[in-house]
Amino acid sequence: MQASTVNFEDFSNNTPSQSQPNVTYSNNTDPSRSSHLRDKIRSLHHPVASFFHLLWKLSALIAYLFGGYMFANHFVIAFVTCVVLIAFDFWTTKNVSGRLMVGLRWWNEIKEDGSNEWVFESLEDKSKISSFEKVLFWGGLFGSPILWVTFAIVSFFGLNPRWLLITLIGAALGIANIVGYVKCARDARNKLKSMATSYIASTVINQSLQRV
């Protein structure tokens, strides 16, 4: 809303002044906020990955919320649409957006003896990662499963088992990505600590040898 200030000149002898009123307007909007947001968007190193990282999550949630209205008499169509979007989100987050936005990747391998093994990859040069992309990635990673769990609780108490199944699928795949990336981030920190410890130890040993 714009605020305006009107200054009228004094009237004399009950005769209106011939001069026009001086009208000034003040704009209350802060241009620094919009410019700050533009700078944040421009700082994205992988805008396409960031876009799809959020797109599939929002699309799946919107399809769930409005699927009952769009496909009122065709639950199968709504179910398939939601599950496909959830699967797209899981695959994109696991294989694309995590690798590009935060420099992390995980997967689980099944060995010949039937046991499974977690495998983690992490980018050593963190300077290629945008801080704003980190916020978008981790925010979307945790935000989506939280919403799915909330919808699951509502569907459970609302005695709606068909829609409850969709929420459980979304929550399960989202939590799987959370577990994988939390373990991957912890593994990356441990590797960084071990590299720093090894570097310090080698430096101390070299300096000791030089003194001898």
Image (tube, rainbow, N blue to C red):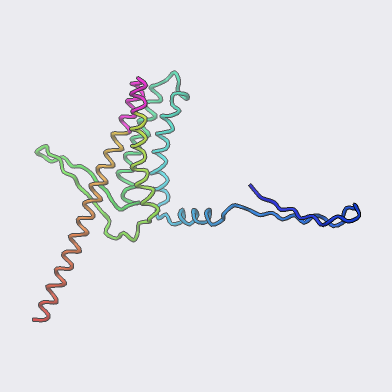
Say if the magenta span includes residue 182: no
Residue at the far bottom in the pictured view: 211
Image position, residue 100 (x, y; %): 34, 51
Left or right? Give the position of 16 relative to 122.
Answer: right
Tell me where the magenta segment starts and ends, as one range: 153-170
Left or right? Give the position of 153 relative to 21.
Answer: left
Q: Nearer the viewer, residue 69 or 31?
A: 31
Q: Nearer the viewer, residue 30 or 100?
A: 30
Picture residue at 72% right of the left edge, 55% below the top: 24
Quadrant containing the C terminus is: bottom left
Q: Within the image, what quadrant is residue 64 found in?
A: top left
Q: Within the image, what quadrant is residue 75 found in?
A: top left
Picture residue at 33% right of the left edge, 25% below the top: 164
Image position, residue 109 (x, y; %): 18, 42
Q: Nearer the viewer, residue 84 or 61?
A: 61
Say if the magenta span includes residue 155: yes
32 in relation to 140, above or below: below
38 in relation to 206, above or below: above
Image position, residue 18 (x, y; %): 88, 56
Picture residue at 53% right of the left edge, 53% below the top: 34
Q: Nearer the viewer, residue 54 or 6?
A: 6
Image position, residue 116 (x, y; %): 15, 40
Q: Within the image, what quadrant is residue 210 found in?
A: bottom left
